[in-house]
Amino acid sequence: MLKVYNTLTKRIEEFEPLEDRLVKIYVCGPTVYDYTHVGHARTYIAFDVIVRYLRYKGYKVKYVVNITDIDDKIIRRARELNISPKELARKFEEEFFEDMKALGLIKADYYPRVTEHISDIIKVVRRLVEKGYAYVAGGSVYFDVTKFPDYGKLSGQTLEQIKAGARIEPDPNKRHPADFALWKKAKEGEPYWDSPWGPGRPGWHIECTVMSMKYLGEQIDIHGGGTDLIFPHHENEIAQSEAYSGKKPFVKYWLHAGYLMIKGEKMSKSLGNIIPVKDFLAKYEPDVLKLLVLSAHYRSPIDFSWEKAEQAKNSLERIKRAVERLRKVMTYERLHSENLSPKEKEIYERVNLLRQKFEEAMDDDFNTPKALAEIFEFISYINKKLDEDLVEGALARYAHDTLMELLNVLGLLQKFREAGVSGDVEPLIELLIKVRDDARKRKDWKTADYIREELRKLGVVLEDTPKGTIWKLAK
Ligand SMILES: [Zn+2]
């Protein structure tokens, strides 16, 4: 049974999606004004593994990541570079996709852009005004937090605390310091769209409410993002969404990925300590970053260092060597577990135990450090058995395939797949072997040799042993 930590309830809860076997997940995506750095990548790697594991568990997953392509930072940066905000946003959106692809992260089902949902946003803002949750002031529209009694339920902040902690408020239009803009009046020289309140552009928070509802419906299972988004972004999303739909809750499980720190500080552009994904990938392969990230629980902070990258690189090599060793001795015929010797049986059971332990770890709020520890423990074990020449043939392949399957749930070793037959072709090869066996029983050597020769041409090598025919791929 999968259990997840819910930021909303601050408890570990059993995971039960709203609809049977379907998981709707929305993750706050990038504001595309600069290169993706490894701190951002940490969040996307975390949710990549979460989505992969949900699929491994048999859930159908609908996954949305938004692209914030209009915002203060984009406008400012475009001005500095003397290009249009759109030009800037498209460039860094492309860079973002390239980085995600280089990291081998699975694609979301939708990557909606804010600028392509302006009319949807206006509709929702208008409805919030009509329902009395929002007010118009000076050409902008604000959400009135005092109208939403549940405000603060995610972050634990109360309106009194926010008011007391508010610095000098530069926006005189706001009635309460925690009120936030749903629609911002256009300033001179900024991009704008026409609206019932005059020319302007959407506030940041409303986009996620609108696009989440548009692609996934008014209630979803998982909403994710970095811990820094809990307040005010996600708090505001809840207020808008639940005020709009009148339904509760907007999100069943709120999941937040911890910070990536560098020398004790959060990696962020404002601190000037960022490492772009591109720079990291110029030094190491993508799996090194993944292994480094997954060595910590997704909710825990990670202290990034190049020493850790070096360690992750060594760990990755260790995994690859074990996989390669299994590949050298494995063959492809079907494993008959009932025919195994006691020593082989023990290995077979150990492989099954690996899967069980891996699932237990992942079921425990996606505990990837534990899951990786299980994998490394298994690698030590199987290396020992390989040293003793106790693993070979179909049993080696069983160990190999299980290991690869679990590594792939973590997004690892995707480019380390063997060249060779796909799973669909295997039953056909098995069938040909059976036909050949029948021919041999009839002493029809011509047919038997013909099948062996033709399979060899296709890269499949048959070998007759006292235990039966085994097969492998020609190297
Ligand atoms: Zn968001």
Image (cartoon, rainbow, N blue to C red):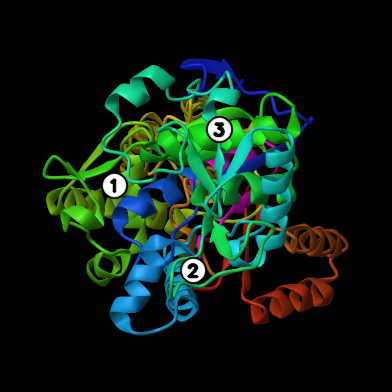
Q: Which residues are magenta?
A: 49-69
Residue 97's tag is 2
Q: Is residue 273 above or below residue 251?
A: below
Secondary structure type for disc 1: helix
Q: Position of residue 294 (x, y in %)?
A: 36, 42
Q: In this rendered view, identify the residue nearer to me: 352 or 75.
A: 75
Q: From the image, tell me which residue sits under label 1.
A: 292
**Residue at the disc numbered 3:** 144
Labelled pair 3, 2 in contact (Cβ < 8 Å): no
Along the line of sight, the residue nearer the viewer: 235 or 47: 235
Horizontally, residue 412 falls left or right of residue 273, namely right
Q: Residue furthest bottom?
A: 82
Give the farthest residue toward the right: 442
Q: From mark 3 to mark 2, how far is it between C-alphas?
A: 36 Å
Which of disc 2 and disc 1 is earlier in sequence? Answer: 2
Q: Is residue 475 visible?
A: yes
* Label 1 to label 3: alpha-carbon separation: 43 Å
- Residue type at mark 3: give it: Asp
Left or right: residue 81 compared with residue 368: left
Residue 283, above or below 147: below
Residue pictured at 62% horizontal, 62% vertical: 198
Alpha carbons under labels 1 and 2: distance apart: 21 Å
Number of marks in picture: 3
